[in-house]
Image (cartoon, rainbow, N blue to C red):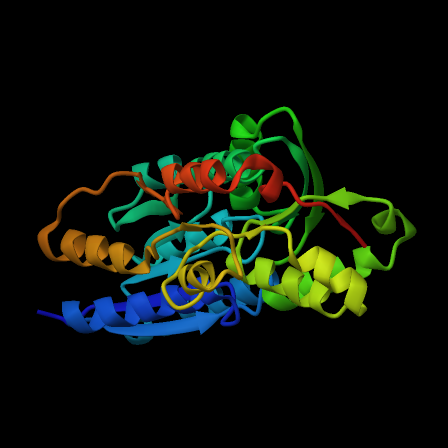
Amino acid sequence: MKKLSFLVSLTNNENDYQQEQAAAAEKAARRLGVDLQIVHANSDAVTQSQQLLHFIQGSASSRPDAIVFEPAGGTGFPQVARAAVAADIGWVVLNHQADYLAQLRKSCHVPVFSISSDHREIGKIQGTQFAQLLPQGGSILYIEGPTNSSAAHERTAGMNSTKPANIQVKTMHASWTEESAHRAVTSWLRLRTSKETIIDLVGAQDDSMAAGARKAFAELPEGDRERWLKIPFTGCDGLPKTGQSWVRSGLLAATIYVPPNTDIALEMLTEAIRTGSVLPESKLITPESIPSVEELAARAAKVGTGKLHLSARA
């Protein structure tokens, strides 16, 4: 039997979740006995599409059996997808809504499907965390992913659906990395309006972005720095060596564990190609609050609402 070969295309190699995606794929490839190549798009959609086309348009002997990719921009590359299946290359989209998949599946005989974290559920959990951390209400500085990211939009929609009405949200955008959030928050702190804004909690859609925000506040003059760093910070992804560790150390008040899904994609592809089994069009991965929402509520009850509701003026 021919040894299967897969290509995994990730958005960047700076974000902790993307690094975990790569590690999970490598571990799964070794377990499954398949060849694997991983490329990174440096958070640029044009670069990513060019990388994918390079493999699709290569010689037949060098083409992968399937491509697994997480979009670096707001598109799922429908034209690239059609080129891939025309070349008998399977196509798997991670963490992105790709409406063209249903039509594509009707006209191809290679595996085509999507796997995603349940981003709306992630947002719902985060909104519930905000409610527990700010039981008397307040104002949040909310750091979203890129404006063209469907995952970011879904997380925001979920958060707004569970956030209490007495919690107000000030939003800014970053690109899923610590550096981008650091730049965004630093720029905001230079504005006069930021000095007049009361913020009770900093919530980010990614642990790396939460870390970047903390770094920006830590660079403020001494008096302002202490006030900012006393308020709760929360993130998402909750990986063991980063987000979960930061919760244990107190750098984050809460995070949300979002399991990597490249390994699941490779397992499903390998099974489908080797056995001819039919795969579902989409699969959702369930997230988990860390600590649990119940534990956050117990902490709030223990310390008293007044002690959790802290305000910062930059």
Q: Residue furthest top?
A: 165
For the N terminus, the image quarter is: bottom left
Residue 247 point in image, percent of width and height? 45, 58
User: From this viewpoint, is residue 99 visible?
Assistant: no
Residue 90 point in image, percent of width and height? 30, 55
Q: Residue furthest right?
A: 192
Q: Residue at the location (77% across, 43% down)?
A: 198
Residue 140 point in image, percent of width and height? 67, 42
Q: Residue at the location (42% across, 61% down)?
A: 248
Q: Which of 123/11 is in front?
A: 123
Q: Which of 204/231 is in front?
A: 231
**Residue 278 picture quarter:** top left
Where 236 falls versus 130 (above or below)? below
**Is residue 43 shown left or right of residue 224?**
left
Where 66 falls versus 81 (above or below)? below
Q: How many marks?
A: 0
For the C terminus, the image quarter is: bottom right
**Residue 218 picture quarter:** bottom right
Residue 206 point in image, percent of width and height? 53, 55
User: From this viewpoint, is residue 299 visible?
Assistant: yes
Q: Residue at the location (9% across, 52% down)?
A: 275
Q: Residue at the location (14% across, 54% down)?
A: 271
